[in-house]
Amino acid sequence: MADLDNKDQTEMDPADMEDVEEVEEEETGEDNSKARQLTMQMMQNPQILAALQERLDGLVGSPSGYMESLPKVVKRRVNALKNLQVKCAHIEAKFYEEVHELERKYAALYQPLFDKRSDIVKAAYEPTDEECEWKPDEEEELTEEMKEKAKVEEEKKDEEKEDPKGIPEFWLTVFKNVDLLSEMLQEHDEPILKHLQDIKVKFSDAGQPMSFTLEFYFEPNDFFPNTVLTKTYKMRSEPDESDPFSFDGPEIMGCTGCTVDWIKGKNVTLKTIKKKQKHKGRGTVRTVTKTVPNDSFFNFFSPPEVPESGELDEDSEAVLAADFEIGHFIRERIVPRAVLYFTGEAIEDDDDDYDEEGEEADDEEGEEEADEENDPDYEPKKDANPPEECKQQ
């Protein structure tokens, strides 16, 4: 009887075998779907994610065991490679020192152009018609009729209001257009930043420790008599002897602000609050006035001081990390390309740097899937089997 059963299974109709295979494939597909669903649920659980991250953090930097398994003579040669790597780091440091010197050289070439920009912004210089002529991109080109209409509207607006001087609120607009900077701005900062006329970058002199200073120039105002507020960033461009392999170019090591001589009652970095206090014994109530720190862009000029030990609490570390990022961004992007951040064109370019490749890839995948689904001759099973020349012998 057992032999008969085996015979029946052996002589099963090929069509029935296909049915069995299909059922097994469906069951496997369901299992995979459940597994994916369970994985998604787990990844959405913050406790599981935290535990996973903690586990991964513990693995970072831990030896894999491979190095320990190498013969002593091979380890010796690996040490020689490490020494070569340290020498490479020192050469790289020299490279960045020369880059800094190039920055100093070209900063002097850029400065006359930046000075002219400043003169136009603050109405110290009126550009000529030739300097104001700008050829728009193809997308911006207008018909003659539209140009005439726009010209009439502009003339009408000019008649309705008095002629503005220079480019009003130029730097304030730049700050408001950049997320990194607008997050620092408070409503009470805006009347002050309307008086900001220019921002300059000054590099340390040749032979001096590497650093750069941001200089903020203000016109006379009702808030402080300072004409220039400064922020200096000290940098290091040499490998750390205790960890030379971590060297990845110059890094900001600390920063120094300046004192803002606020006119009495105009200090936006402080605010006055009133608190009621009740006497425990007599039960009388009194009102106490206290001065406490206030959120403001101008806190930028009073960064946390780094102690000689170099150790900071978490809050101060976070503030300094953000401060370094802002200082670097103003130096590298805002000052050189201010007009493009004023118009918003640089912001569009920054946005284009992200997600485009991913979106395009997603779109292509979606198009391929749609093409396959819409193809009446498309059979998934056929695609699953590789052609004969790709099969292993």
Image (tube, rainbow, N blue to C red):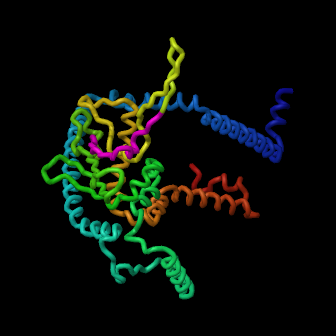
Residue lying at the far left in this picture: please name it.
207
Residue lying at the far top in this picture: please name it.
281
Image spot of residue 245 (x, y percent): 28, 39
Identify the residue shown where x is 33% and y is 47%.
Answer: 263
Q: 71 or 173, which lies in front?
A: 173
Q: 149 or 146, which lies in front?
A: 149
Q: Can the viewer see residue 221?
A: yes
Residue 166: quadrant of the picture: bottom left
Q: Is residue 321 magenta?
A: no
Identify the residue shown where x is 29% and y is 29%.
Answer: 71
Image spot of residue 330 (x, y percent): 35, 54
Q: 89 or 66, which lies in front?
A: 89
Rendered position, 192 above or below 133:
above
Residue 192: quadrant of the picture: bottom left
Magenta stretch, main secondary structure, is: loop
For the record, the magenta segment spans: 253-273
Left or right, 157 with reference to 244: right
Q: Is residue 272 magenta?
A: yes
Image spot of residue 12 (x, y percent): 82, 41
Identify the residue shown where x is 24% and y is 42%.
Answer: 85
Q: Can the viewer see residue 323?
A: no
Left or right, 73 with reference to 21: left
Image spot of residue 358 (x, y percent): 54, 55
Rendered position, 376 above or below 41:
below
